Amino acid sequence: MNWFYESDADLRYAPRLNLLYSMVLTAIICWHESANGGTLTSSEVATQVARVQFDSGFLTDNGRREVDLSRFEKGNAVLPSIYRVDVYVNDNLVKSERIAFRVSAHSPDAQPCFDASLLQNIGVDVERLSEQTRARLSEDRACMELAEAIPNAAVAFVFDDQRLRLGIPQSALRRSPRGYVGPDRWDEGVTMGMLNYNANVYAQRSAGRATTTQGYVGLTAGVNLNEWRFRHEGTYSWGTTRGGQYQDIATYMRRDFAALKAQLTIGESYTTGELFDSTQFRGVQLGSDDRMLPESMRGYAPVVRGVANSNAKVAIRQNGLTIYETTVAPGAFEIDDLYTTGYGGDLNVTVTEANGSVRQFSVPYAAIPLSLRPGMHRYNFVAGTVRDMQSNNNPLFMQGTWQQGITNLVTGYGGMTIAQGYLSGMLGGAFNTPVGAIGIDVAQAGTSVPGVKRFTGTSARISYSKSIRQTQTDVTVAAYRYSTSGYFGLNDAMRVREQVEKYGSVDSVVRQRSRMSLSLNQALGQRGGRLAGSVSTVNYWNRNSSDLNYSVSYSNNFRRVSYSVSALRERSRMGRSETTYYVSATIPLGRASSTMATASFSRNTNGQMQATTTLSGSAGRDDQLSYSVTGNRASGGVDRASNDGSGTLVYRGAYGEVSATAGAGTGYQQGSLGIRGAAVAHRGGVTLAQPLSETFAIVNAPDAAGARVLNAQGVRVDGHGYAVVPYLTPYSMNSVEIDPEGLSTDVEVKTTTQQVAPRAGAVLMLTFPTSLGKSAVIDARRPNGSGLPFGAAVVDATGKEVGVVGQGSRVFARGLDDKGTLTVRWSDDARALCSISYALPMVNEMAYRNTVRRLDAVCATQ
């Protein structure tokens, strides 16, 4: 059951709420055991509950008088109390909130009541309400039903899911972008410590040589303290032919600033690389974080503007799909919260007026990664020292960038970098045109090399993106960049200054002259498959050779078989060229498709051929175990023909991931063992976990050991009542859910789902309240062997109701002591009761979860 009690005072409603549930469950147990002799699954319970019907006219006390079932006449009614509910407004989840339900004159159920603060929190523009309503809402302990406060509003409470669905007219709501999650709902999490680890040992033995062993351990350690996140990343590697070495990758502390929509980083990190090349640094960085924006405001999408002559319906389609639809009032309208839908595809807008007339127009839509919506901006400022792992020098530098969405058609951007002996600036723009998205920028840089001269150069870049609906062609990104011989990026400039200081040669650092890249995707009809291609080339000022890579591939499906054909050509820095042709096919084995067979063949221009067959799949309820077995045959080229085989096993459990590989071939053997996982220290102890992302959550469900966490594969609550959800999406609503199926009947999980919006890097502590009490099925009879009245209440010595009498005079009771006395009462008549003395049987701990205590008892009259 999913109700949740906020305080001890609310527990007084628990017996009444559980009456009907206990009676129905008892009847189901009786029916199912007599029919199947087994234990019900959750799906079977749902099915059978729908079929249960009660008619008090057929229920009598040995034919003398009817049993009093008046307390069940209203079913599982909502009683006055305070409940924690998930609030949905017009089918959009807005928050989880404690809401008071009070007796209503308009409904047999208690109704939620609202004050001004609560209405504001769920998105209502209180200033739009009538003056009289605002006055009532502002009173001390205000409590208004929604329909009283907002005309035409509606309420529906889904009790089992603790979901409060509100229908509120748009005219009463604040204007908020779709997907908006306000900063007041962001959770900064709890204080904790964590250690993420990734370890691997690899051993290889070749013919005539000793076995070599190499090892690697990657670590991420961190502490969260209030709004600050402290992190350290490092690696340790060793081998039989060399000693061990630890490498410090990054150490920093970070926090966010909601007002600035930005992250502040102090320590070692790297620049974003959006305008200038990415640079590692040690210092301070303040940069905007688009994740803090509503999903509908991230990336680029144009603003759609138009005029409606009536209450009109506006539908927006892209590439034949309806991506947005709404109703607008007469007059000018503006739609600025479209979700980002890739890099191209013009928007077709249809305005359907109230009289049925239709108008259509088109809005150009093509974007490159630097495009922003009108009015939106993105920035990044850094000050510190350049941190080059290949250099001993750490010169001071500063860098700032700014991107600004100006109109639907134009995004402007620019930036500047200042360092010892170096200065560069950039200006550019991204343009959304009917023929595609075009980005153009120019960077100018000056580099002073001591003892040589001052280099000055220019680098110009143009990029293009377009989706052509008519031909189903996507030009993902096409870019060309040319740099004069005197242009250096920051990383190259700092490196050449150091190299000249040591060796006196500017040409020891390769300077790029031009770079070109292109990526195309072409759909060949509904069943014709897809053709993809890409090419990139780079050449240099101070090196004669160039790098050239390109590939083309075709993929399709034939019934259940997927196949692909590809060709790849590469030219290395040494000037050697090689083309490889590759074909593969994958076939699912069995209906469930958990096992796949893949066959592939490749051949290159050097005459080398290779045929490979792989069998792969997964097993377990959560696909915890995955495996693959591969056989390979190679021939041609300078090497003789060879055969080899290998296998891989990976197990993903609640506490981490273990992997093992083994292989053998002509003249060699290989094996490896790896382990990945994490440990999280928190107020409840230390919990082992799967590998963690930046943001995650700790689940606390006391006494619910073994319950599955549905958000993550293989995660279960441990024996201490904790589990770790290894990944959450920051600044967005996340649903965390546990599945109590398989728990002992002694454990009741009062709520199974929570909605949370964590801050980046936060670790949330989510408590799922549980109730632990011994339960039993009691076959009770009167001294003369007759059954007890169906529906009679069963209470313990304290007067707490613990169950009801079901079919066949059977009682399912929860919250029992090891022994005691229960009283059965079936009407207000003082003589309509009897007592059951019981002693619960011992239960084998090994079979505890799957065992229902059973006992026979006599209900003696007093």
Image (tube, grey):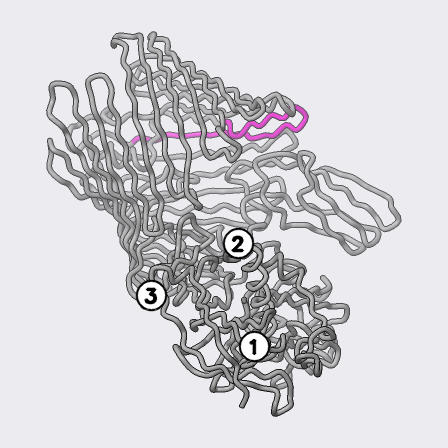
Mark in the foreground, 2 or 3: 3
The answer to whether residue 171 is above or below residue 494 is below
> Mainly helix, strand or loop, the magenta region?
strand
Mark in the foreground, 1 or 2: 1
Left of 516 or right of it: where is 295? Answer: right
Quarter location, residue 630: top left
Is the residue marked by circle 1 packed among few (<14), some (14-19), or many (20+) residues within 10 Å?
A: few
Mark 3 and mark 1 lie on one chain; the one further toward the N terminus is 3
Give the percent coordinates (x, y) of residue 652.
36, 45
Give the percent coordinates (x, y) of residue 73.
70, 76
Secondary structure found at label 1: loop
- In the depicted view, which residue is nearer to us: 745 or 855? 855
| Residue 263 seen from this side | yes
- In the depicted view, which residue is nearer to us: 249 or 243? 243
Report which residue position mark 3 lands on. 191
Numbered circles on residues, count: 3
Whether residue 467 is in magenta: the answer is: yes
The answer to whether residue 551 is above or below residue 833 is above
Give the percent coordinates (x, y) of residue 135.
69, 82
For the point 64% across and 89% down, which residue is it?
A: 828
Quarter location, residue 360: top right
Looking at the image, the residue that sits furthest to the bottom is 830
Secondary structure found at label 2: loop
Give the percent coordinates (x, y) of residue 40.
53, 57
Report which residue position mark 2 lands on. 293
Label 2, label 3: how far apart the Cα atoms are: 26 Å
Report which residue position mark 1 lands on. 785
- Residue type at numbered disc 1: Gly
For the point 33% across and 10% down, which residue is it?
A: 608
Q: Which residues are magenta?
A: 455-478
